[in-house]
Image (tube, grey):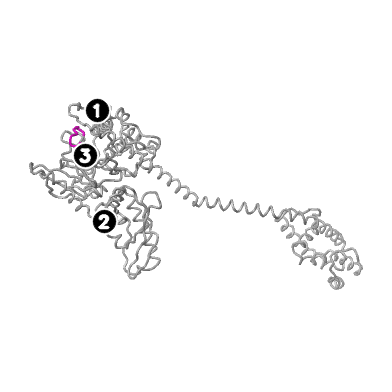
Amino acid sequence: MALVEEKVSKLELDDTVLLICTIEAAHNLKDHTEYVIRVQKGPIPENSWTVLRRYSQFVNLENELRIAGIGLPLPPKKILGKMDREFIAERQQGLQDFLDAVLKHHMLAISKPVRIFLDEANFAANLQETALRHISMFFRSESHWEVVEPLPDIGWRIRKKYFLIKDKRQAREKYLLSWSQLGPDKQLSEKDLDLCMKTFSSFQHPYLCPVKFASCNDTCGITIRQYYMQGTLRDYICKSKPRQPFLKKYASPKYYQMLPFSDIQRYGRQLLEILKYLHSKGYYYGHMHAGNVIIDGDNNCQLLDLENIILGLPSYYRAHLTQYRKIQSLESVDVYCFGQLLYEMTFGRSLNVATCDVYPYHCPPELRSVLESVLTTEACKNGLPSVNDLLQHQLFQSVIPHPIMDTVHIKIPARLKQPLKEAFLIVTRHLHVEQKLIHHYQRVSKAQAYHMSDEEKRKRRRSKRKQLLERQQSTEVPTINGNSHNTSTDSHNSSISGQIVNNVSPDITPDSQNISVDSHNAGIESHDTSADNCDVSSDSGDISTRSSNFSQVNGASDASSHDADISGSEISDPGERHALLHSITGFSSFDHRVQSG
């Protein structure tokens, strides 16, 4: 049971799925700091795990990636004060920037050092020894083959190993053996898969690299082809040595060259011809890139790794293909990969992103037209042209195809046609499911980012304040209307007092003027205060009315206001003034002040 679970887990591993990393925390131990890294595989947040890494492990990763020739922003070392809280926070941000820069580069993100750093449990195994054991088992029935030497890391796939071998019957001839574990998209049964692998050795086509031997078992497959000293088309473009490590050759090449326009036309036409022929036989390629194309002695293109799709290996551009739902068939996958290869032949470097909407001015119009029909964002969203559409383009129409019918022999056994058709349908369905899943999580993340944006937060705050203000106004209006009659009555009484003040006795004029000034100021403040709250009845507009209004807001000013009214009265008898004051306001404390005045 454990063996079955181990096989299933291996088949489910997809090395092309991009990883998302976030450093969540930092823990100080005795003499070092450990950083907690949350690693998410793909768009599903639940598919994540945490790893603990020290700063020295980040340094080791940067040293391994230095072979790529890409400057990475790793924070510098520090001896004193490295346990300080502020320094650790600053270093944590620097390490986050370092991881972001690594995962942003397509070739670095899928490289073995990065995968081991982030997912050691699934990538730390020594596959070189595993491959040699399997190869020795295959060679028991093919004893004339002999392994000369391994060629470590010449390809980008972590679970694919290469060896230089020879045929004992022809010691001078050298061949390239490729060993690969079965991938997550393997759909054929073991029996059908082995038959299909053996059928490849009978394929003959001037644009296909011949297969000397191919076989498989329940865990892996091997293929033997002729070894080309000059390497692949990507080696030619990057001016690199074929036996160097993948990152050193292709991640950031020091020198590169663009192909002549005539060669681009010729190679493009040949690649489209072989794709069209394979599709007519019910077979799809799905793995076209410059590393899978060689140029033979007759200046013809030849495809490598025809077996990748039936072994279940994911495409080099898998992360790009899952971003656009209009890339919905295996033919459109081949067309998209062809567009990426055409870009690399035209400009001498890989695109490294999913789409390109702007092209250099020196790009010929015919090439620009083809690239825009395949690689622009609009094309990927609306649908790609077919292989026949590209063959009808004027860029490739001027190339005279060579008569190849006499040298072509590609025959798929009848018993394999239906299983291959069903396998390709399942692979297409898996692509659709992954595209929908990524599209869903992209929408969710975009909505969350918009909801948490500063502008949206300000809108929500303004909306809450507006609702609160409306709620307060709706509760205050009935209260003010209920008190409006009392306010009007008080204003009327105050106006009567104001009329009496106008005919004040000359004996008490100075004090009454001062008090009237106070009353006037208080009245103005009262008017402002009542205006802020609501519209109070305006039956009296003179100073005494405002004084009365203020007296309701602030009872402390009532005395001074009414004293001012009495002090300015025409009544000269103090007793009468006192009676009038008491009848209006209820205050009698001004008798002494009035008499003394």
Q: What residue is disc 1 on? A: 399
Determine the secondary structure under disc 3. Answer: helix
Q: Report the residue at 49% width, 52% height from top.
A: 452
The label shown at residue 183 is none
For label 1, the crowd category at 10 Å Cα-Cα, with few meaning under 14, some 14 to 19 and many 20 or more, is: some
- Name the residue nearer the viewer: 134 or 2: 2
Q: Give percent across and percent down for residue 595.
A: 87, 72
Q: CA distance from mark 2 to mark 1?
A: 49 Å
In the image, is residue 132 part of the stretch drawn in magenta? Answer: no
Q: Main secondary structure of the magenta part?
A: helix
Q: Give percent across and percent down for residue 502.
A: 85, 60
Left-right relation of 370 to 594:
left
In the image, is residue 200 part of the stretch drawn in magenta? Answer: yes
Q: Report the residue at 42% width, 43% height from top.
A: 439
Q: Amino acid at mark 3?
A: Met
Left-right relation of 543 to 405:
right
Q: What residue is disc 3 on? A: 197
Please give the range of residues in magenta: 193-207
Left-right relation of 64 to 456:
left
Determine the secondary structure under disc 1. Answer: loop
Q: Give percent across and percent down for residue 206.
A: 19, 32
Q: What residue is disc 2 on? A: 124
Say above or below: 193 vs 462.
above
- Name the residue nearer the viewer: 480 or 176: 176
Say above or below: 252 vs 562.
above
Nearer to us of marks 1 and 3 is: 3
Q: Amino acid at mark 1?
A: Val
Say which quarter of the image contains residue 237: top left
Nearer to us of marks 2 and 1 is: 2
